[in-house]
Amino acid sequence: MRPLNPGEPSHVGRYRLLASLGAGGMGRVLLAVAPDGRLAAVKQIHPAFAHDDGFRSRFAREVEASRLVSGAYTAAVMDADPSAHTPWLASVYVAGPSLREAVDAAGPLPPDSLRYLTAGLASALADIHRAGLVHRDLKPSNVLLTADGPRVIDFGIARAAEGDSELTRSGSVVGSPGFMSPEQAEGGPLTPASDVFSLGALLVMAATGQSPFAGTSAPQTLYNVVHTEPDLTAVPAEIRALVEPCLAKEPADRPTPAQLLDRLGPAAPSAQPWPAPVHELIRAQEAEARAALVEPSARRRSPVLAVVAAVVLVVGGVLAATLLDVTRSSPGTAVPVAQGGTSTTTPTSTGPPAPLSAAGLRSVDPCRVLGSELKPKIDVHFFSCTYEAPDGRWLDLQLGDRVPSDAAVTDEIAGLPASVGPAKGEGRCTAIALIPDQETHGVSVTTSPGVGDAPEADPCGTARNTLTEAIGALRQGGAGWRDAKGTLATVDPCSLTDDAEVGELFDVVIGTEPDGLHRCSWDVGGPVDITLERAVQPGKGGLDESPVRVGGRTVYQQANPAPGSPSCQVSWAHIPVEEGFTEVVRVKYYALGSGADVDDECGKVHRLAERIMPRLPQP
């Protein structure tokens, strides 16, 4: 359990945040207190999943099914918001170590503890399957040991992530190799029998300390799951008799959770079902949770900030405008003013931004970064350029690219943390290096064969070398936009407004998140987005757009009066790029679950658009 980071929101939905419990591939988990005073574990889904509409739909369905699971051996779902800017799910907080932590602390569990574990997990799976769910990721970290038995967590979340080609690129699969079923390892359809296989592997791990299929690599482990028979000689005979049928390669040959419970028989009650070191861990976590409830928030303002806040209250809008002018300024950009909806242009003398910062990357024309042998061919976006090599290969350079959630950042390129691996499609590879002080975005190069060309022997070597060259060129400078006057390319969309203004027009801002270099989103229960891009001129793209007048100019509105969750977007041309193609500003609000009238929401979008128009750079 760790303190929250300074500046983090104090709430997720109705839940007051207390501390961080940990993080994983799907997101992070926070300790929170519910409105009724109960402790909750709030799981915030990784931003990379949050930007996928298919994931949101699957997550919403799985959450609804998960609400039906309320057995004694699961952590009941309390609340969720799949439509939030960062989707989240709150479940009852369970104080206790994971099975992995327990075995690491106390060693393999004794037979009596294994019986309690088997009974609890089989009961949990029976409840999960009864609700129509398949867990899909039953592993040691998803089983918590409490003072009165095990608890299964995270059921339904792996299902929501499954099938997303972008998030499972490089051929990876959702799940943990050492505890997958053979059918899951082969990418086949899953039934409740898949969870029973995982249960068998989990019990072997609890009895011996390791997965029965562990290999020297993930591919070797998956091969073992599909093709080899595990060595169960170290598993106590009573438990081995239960485990062996669970590990049958054919799903139809495995018992159901109910059959396992019948074979196990009734378990005698115990005041201490686990070894003493495990109960010590449980008591320690219970004490930490109690302390988090009574201690002052880790994010309490410092005395200096408290004084500043008091001065702001006294002086009001004048000081607010002054502070905003100081903190929002950037060379050559328009600066928003908090009150009155007017603007002023204030060049600053802070010097050029760091080359690999977000501001530095926005100042770069990606089609001027790589050497003369590579010919720029496609420059649709501000942040990317596709080059053609003399031998016909294509190289796609992206600045501010999102790091995939499954990327293994175990490499280094040009002194930066990096990930290199195959991309979707034969002969393709992506190398991505993280931007300094960023965990979610980087600079990437993807290489692919030209049309009709055979794949090259080492595409990842090419991607690595090209990215090394690109980072060197970025650090050296000199690849700026040839004509930067008036362009949106250098503008930070997050600087065009602020939380106070968005809150005034829409609702209280829960969080603000940049997405790449040219999109920013404010979470007000639904997302308010500002996007700057190159695109077909609004009104000429064949979309269902209606011209309306906002701020003295014509903008094009797309309104969706979906019952309960209307959305509205306005777009307008900023400066032309070429015939029919322009720099475009888009302002959108998705009023999730509000029940509001779409015309009212469009009015809010119009007012925000009108306020940011004079803050844009002038041609």
Image (spheres, rainbow, N blue to C red):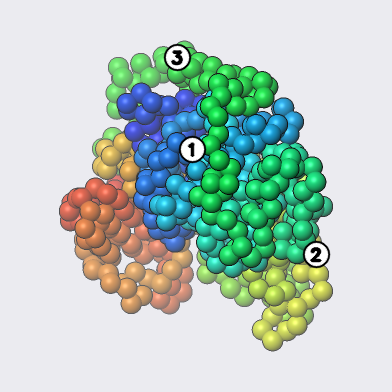
Q: Which residue is mark 3?
A: 294
Secondary structure beneath dot 2 equals helix
Amino acid of disc 2: Gly
Amino acid of disc 3: Val
Q: Nearer the viewer, residue 483 or 312?
A: 312
Q: Residues within 10 Å of mark 2 (few under 14, many from 20)?
A: some
Answer yes or no: do the residues labelled 3 and 1 have beta carbons within 8 Å?
Answer: no
Nearer mark to the viewer, of 3 and 2: 3
Secondary structure beneath dot 3 equals helix
Q: Which residue is mark 1?
A: 73
Q: Residues within 10 Å of mark 3 (few under 14, many from 20)?
A: few
Residue drawn at point x = 76 percent, y = 69 percent: 459
Residue 153 x/y as whole percent? 51, 41
- Whether 376 is drawn above or below 368: the answer is below
Checking the image for residue 461, the label placed there is 2
Q: Nearer the viewer, residue 313 or 477?
A: 313
Residue 304 x/y as whole percent? 47, 15
Q: Say left or right for 464 vs 271.
A: right
- Whether 555 is drawn above or below 122: the answer is below
